[in-house]
Amino acid sequence: MINPTGQDIVKLKLYEEQRGECPYSVSTMDITRLFEYGYAEIDHIVPRSISHNDTYANKVLAKATYQQKKGNCLPLEFLQGKERDNFIVWVNNSNLRREKKNRLLKEKITDEERGEFKDRALNDTRTMSRFLLNYLNDFLLFSPFLTGRKRHVTAVNGGTTATLRKRWGLTKIREDGDLHHAVDAAVIACTTQKMINDLSRHYDHNETRFLNARRDPRGEKEERFPQPYPFFREELMARIAPTKTQLDIAIAQLSLLPYTQGEIANLQPIFVSRMPRRKVGGAAHKETIKGITESGEQVKKVSLVSLKLDKDGEIAGYYRPEDDVLLYDALREQLIKHGGKGEKAFIEDFYKPKKDGTPGPLVKSVKITEKSTLNVLLRDPKGCVKASADHDSMVRVDVFHVAGDGFYLVPIYVADTIKPELPNRAIVANKPYEQWKEMDNEDFIFSLYPNDLVFVKQKKPISFNKTHKESSLPETELYEDAFVYYKGTDIAVGSISLINHDNSYSKRLGVKTLLALEKYQVDVLGNYSKVSRETRQSFSR
């Protein structure tokens, strides 16, 4: 007896629709193993990463090995040779609906189709905008206008705001960071009914001004484009200056205009507020399932170029060489000829030798074992360990400070949230998990989730690099110290990934020797305050 999930029901429905056959391997699937972990999986015909299509018409049931090999390709992009021919025959002879057949036999996705996927997403956005407009009109209570106006909520055409932005000299370079959203907000806020009326009058004036040439051959002067208020653009550019240099230039320009020194001194640049992601969700482990030996080592396939010899002259970590001594000896001999370096030994294709010395089948990869305790163990219904997989989603990182020794990071993964106790080993750069440092809970200071605001300071200025290569900003920006947002942790070297408030610059920074690492909370208006020492929180099971 099992309690079927919605996914199980879809699996069974697809199994029956496909007459119990896997379309990619064109082989029968065992219904008694249908709900067995790692046997059969639902596959999106046109990958979701491209189409965002999760409908039933875009799904088939396939054996897990083929589903994993397919990746983010179309079926006809990954199937080759006889398998491809058998697949085409299977689809044509199946009872599937024409829509699904067409998807299965699709050979490639054109740029035009990719654009259609994007347009579809934009149409969904427009639908949401109309819904929100009606919702605000129907359910929000507004104070009466002093002027007697009745409409409190209006919809503005995107073309209008685009025109205003352009005519006000506000360029949009998305790669320069997220402050273009603030510019959009400022433009929309200034697109009042009065501004739209002024815009109409402006166009009317300029379109008809030469009709008066009979009265005055010189015609009337072209009217200046309406502004929300004098020097609107100059002030806005000062508020969204992404770097200190650009802010200094903008302030210098304002000082030449009729702004008082007090007004300029009170001018505060925008600080982007980001919502921390504290939701515990995501995949518990990577999709690639690895074997595991009795001693707890992971078994994985690697390309030949990654092979190397150990200190005893054997292939490091080679899994069960006794299973195919002929192949192992040939690989080892090839490595010895090239100084034990796989990248030199296997530049050209390597063929397994036959007993008579003639070339046999092409060998691209072999199995090796590696020590790995930072993984997820996969068990059968009886609780026996059958395989393992690498951790996937990191929920948070717990920060510890040891007096006289610096800061330490303890990563917490999705799989850790259902364990009786939280992990207590802190990252030691370039060391395996068993050599990581045990932490004392008394040294815990706070937990960091993605988009938490932190203050960092080190002995020398911190050089941040621009986030996007296409950005028009300078390549680097120096900070004596910085308020930045935490994005993630690199467990290999014990560093954290950071972005400045508007995501125009980013940095990976080692934490061990930082002079300061403090956590702040930020409200929706960008005001921030320091967080005091936290109590380490476990997860409800």
Image: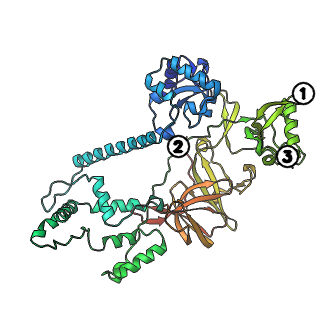
Image quadrant holding the N terminus, namely top right
Q: Nearer the viewer, mark 2 or mark 3?
A: 3
Where disc 2 sits, the SS reads loop
Across and down, in percent, residue 353 comes to: 85, 32
Label ID, residue 356: 1
Instruction: Check disc 2 and give the amino acid type.
Output: Gly
Asked whether residue 1 appears in the rendered view, the answer is no
Instruction: Check disc 3 and give the amino acid type.
Output: Leu
Q: Which residue is mark 3?
A: 309
Across and down, in percent, residue 394 comes to: 58, 48
Q: Residues within 10 Å of mark 2 (few under 14, many from 20)?
A: few
Q: Nearer the viewer, residue 431 or 516?
A: 431
Asked whether residue 227 appears in the rendered view, the answer is yes
Separation of disc 1 and disc 2 at Cα? 56 Å
Q: Nearer the viewer, residue 86 or 439?
A: 86
Separation of disc 1 and disc 3 at Cα? 26 Å
